[in-house]
Amino acid sequence: MSGDTSTTFGFSSIAADARQGLVNGVFSRVASRYDLMNDLMSGGLHRAWKNDLINWMAPPVRDGRPHRLIDVAGGTADIALRYASAVGRGGSAVVADISGEMLEEGVRKANDHAKGDKLTFVQANAEALPFPDRSFDCYTIAFGIRNVTYIERAIAEAYRVLKPGGRFLCLEFSEVRIPGLDALYDFWSFRAIPELGALTAGDRDSYTYLVESIRRFPDQESFVRMISAGGFARVSYRNLSGGIAAMHSGWRI
Ligand code: SAM
């Protein structure tokens, strides 16, 4: 995809240069209702999936053992706050997101949270992270990578900022693998979610983009190949809720 002049925005074809601006528009519009909509759209399941990601990461719990996480496209800080609760006293996390509005929501939540002092917030593009090589022990990106225009660049940046021995973890919507569930899921995605977006956030278009972008994202095995092509080793994935979402893991060795 890198170098193309056109790309997709949901099911529409657009100029690649215009895509990030459209994505930013979506998240600046939905930021204040983002957490509520996540609960409504997933029936609260996104919370369990995010817990699963932290469980698979297994951050060090022994106090004093240093561990640095970067949570890219970290938005309202759900991953970073879970990490802060799980990790021992040597742990710290950077939440990086391109949207100032989403970061503002994250900062607000972190301030209400006893573990918020372990977090810092940085406005940054996943395709060009403002951090030196080999800075972090773990890189996470949850429901973020499908919004990035050049996914290969984001994967290359993940590899660059991870220390040798560091781990890449991605949580993203994926391909449903349970027969029968796909029809129900289609109905929920294309009928119910845009309606919920219209009723709750007054914004049908943003939620139509969100469901369409899910369908455009590579399936589990294709995404394994993309992560491996970025240099990561021992790449594997775990399906969540029958493949509605999947977690991918890879190591920089
Ligand atoms: N990680 C959070 C979560 O799991 O709830 C937020 C996910 S939200 C669906 C997608 C996030 O990706 C938004 O906060 C958006 O601003 C961010 N984003 C989109 N394009 C980005 C980019 N190129 N670089 C960094 N963040 C980006």
Image: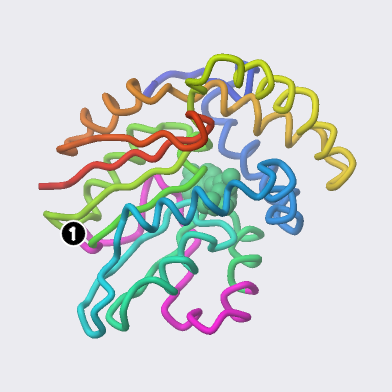
Residue at 37% over, 52% down: 140
Residue at 86% over, 47% down: 200
- Is residue 110 located in the magenta-colored stretch of the structure? yes
Q: Is residue 92 left or right of residue 31?
A: left
Residue at 66% over, 59% down: 101
Does dot 1 land on a helix, a strand or a loop?
Answer: loop
Image vertical order of residue 155 relative to residue 18, above or below: below
Amino acid at circle 1: Arg
Residue marked by disc 1: 134
Residues 110 and 55: in front is 55
- Residue 42 is situated, as x and y percent measured from the top left of the image, at 66, 42
Which of the 4 image quarters holds residue 191? top right
Residues 33 and 99: in front is 33
- Residue 127 is situated, as x and y percent measured from the top left of the image, at 39, 43
Is residue 225 at least partly visible in the picture?
yes
Image quarter hosting the N terminus = top left
Residues 14 and 117: in front is 117
Residues 193 and 106: in front is 193
Q: Is residue 75 left or right of residue 168?
A: right
- Residue 180 is situated, as x and y percent measured from the top left of the image, at 61, 15
Magenta span: 108-136
- Is residue 194 located in the magenta-colored stretch of the structure? no
Which of the 4 image quarters holds residue 11? top right
